[in-house]
Amino acid sequence: MKSTGILRKVDELGRIVIPIELRNKLDIHEKDALEIYVEGNDIILKKFEPNCTFCGKTKKLIEFSDKLICTKCYDKLKNLNNKEN
């Protein structure tokens, strides 16, 4: 992990401000969703990217039965359905 040298204090509601320089660099805009991970004693923030329910890919997603899946997994599902019929 690379240190930025930037410090921010947590306010009374548990919030911190992400500096504009970092938001610009990471393409984070107002109302963007961030995922929060914990790794040991570290808190990791990551810009949320929708991904395939099955394989985790983030490109070429389609909605299928209220779930996002990639076209490759969609094709696999179609092939399974064709084999059953």
Image (tube, helix red, strand yellow):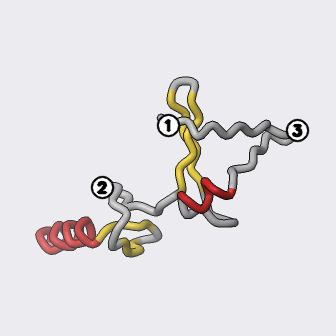
Q: Which residue is mark 3?
A: 12
In the figure, 85 relative to 21: above or below? Answer: below
Look at the image and tell me in which quarter the C terminus lies: bottom left
Give the Cα separation between the discs numbered 2 and 1. Answer: 29 Å
Q: Residues within 10 Å of mark 1 (few under 14, many from 20)?
A: few
| Residue 50: percent from left, percent from top | 46, 63
Kind of residue at badge 3: Glu
Give the Cα separation between the discs numbered 1 and 3. Answer: 27 Å
| Residue 33: percent from left, percent from top | 61, 59
Which is nearer the eye, 44 or 6? 6
Residue 80: quarter of image:
bottom left
Q: Which residue is mark 2?
A: 55
Q: Residues within 10 Å of mark 2 (few under 14, many from 20)?
A: few
Kind of residue at badge 1: Lys
At horizontal 38% and vertical 58% (from top left) the residue drawn is 53
Residue 54: quarter of image:
bottom left
The numbered mark at residue 16 is: none
Which is nearer the eye, 9 or 76? 9
Secondary structure under the numbered disc 3 in the rendered image: loop
At horizontal 15% and vertical 71% (from top left) the residue drawn is 79
In the figure, 41 relative to 23: above or below? Answer: above
Give the mark count: 3
Q: Earlier in the sequence, mark 2 or mark 1?
A: 1
Q: In the orientation shown, which residue stands out farthest toward the right?
A: 12
Q: Earlier in the sequence, mark 1 or mark 3?
A: 1
Q: Is residue 55 left or right of residue 39?
A: left
Q: In the orientation shown, which residue stands out farthest toward the top?
A: 40
Residue 36: quarter of image:
top right
| Residue 26: percent from left, percent from top | 53, 58
Q: Which residue is mark 1?
A: 2
